[in-house]
């Protein structure tokens, strides 16, 4: 006999929280409004046989990118935080290799290019239920900002897309 379903509550789209490095990226976690969790593909290998290809079970997983939509704060600190991260990654080629991964440059702590992003998914009672950890994430795109003088009170949002090695559940 099959296992019985114990929890029949649906996952609400508003129940989540984001954590990166609170020391270096407090705005990302505070202003995150939505997340697009990435796709996962497993492309099976094709082996030629006679006049057709035979598909074999996949031997690797490919992850898409994770995208967060952030609200723009008045001082644009959330945007600048992501901009500075990307700028540091590009400029890290001008620092010693040890400083790129250690989070230390001279006497000053600096964030590393790679960060784990933690997405806590909350229950309908707003209690933590699941946690997805995007390992070794770094921003690859800081999206467009649209400003409109005829806005009807809507807040400005913008997307930030991250690449990562893999994700797992904690």
Image: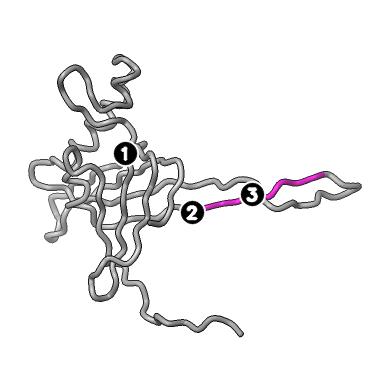
Residue under the point 18% across and 36% down: 80
Instruction: For marks 1 and 2, give the CA distance.
Output: 20 Å
Instruction: For marks 3 and 2, give the CA distance.
Output: 13 Å
Image: 75 above or below 17: above
Residue under the point 66% across and 50% down: 58
Instruction: Give the foreground label among 1 and 3.
Output: 1
Total labels drawn: 3
Between residue 143 and residue 2, name the one nearer to us.
2
Q: Which residue is mark 1?
A: 115
Residue under the point 74% across and 51% down: 56
- Assess disc 2: are there few (<14), some (14-19) or many (≥20) residues with their C-alpha within 10 Å of its C-alpha: few
Q: Which residue is mark 2?
A: 39
Residue 117, position as x, y percentages in the image: 32, 47
Q: Name the quarter where the C terminus is drawn.
A: bottom left
Give the image's coloring scheme: one colour
Residue extent of the magenta highlight: 40-47
Give SS at disc 1: strand
Image: 146 above or below 150: above
Q: Which residue is mark 3?
A: 43
Residue 118, position as x, y percentages in the image: 31, 51
């Amino acid at each position: 006999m099959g296992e019985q379903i114990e929890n029949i509550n649906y996952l609400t789209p508003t129940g989540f929280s984001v954590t990166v490095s609170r020391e270096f990226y407090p705005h990302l976690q505070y202003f995150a409004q939505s997340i697009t969790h990435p796709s996962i593909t497993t492309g099976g290998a094709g082996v030629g046989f006679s006049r057709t290809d035979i598909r074999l079970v996949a031997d690797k997983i490919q992850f898409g990118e994770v995208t967060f939509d952030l609200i723009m704060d008045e001082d644009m600190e959330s945007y600048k935080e992501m901009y500075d991260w990307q700028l540091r990654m590009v400029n890290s080629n001008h620092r010693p290799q040890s400083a790129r991964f250690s989070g230390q440059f001279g006497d000053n702590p600096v964030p590393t290019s790679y960060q784990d992003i933690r997405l806590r998914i909350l229950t309908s009672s707003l209690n933590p239920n699941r946690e997805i950890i995007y390992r070794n994430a770094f921003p690859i795109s800081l999206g467009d900002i649209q400003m409109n003088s005829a806005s009807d009170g809507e807040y400005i949002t913008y997307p930030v897309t991250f690449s990562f090695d893999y994700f797992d559940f904690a």
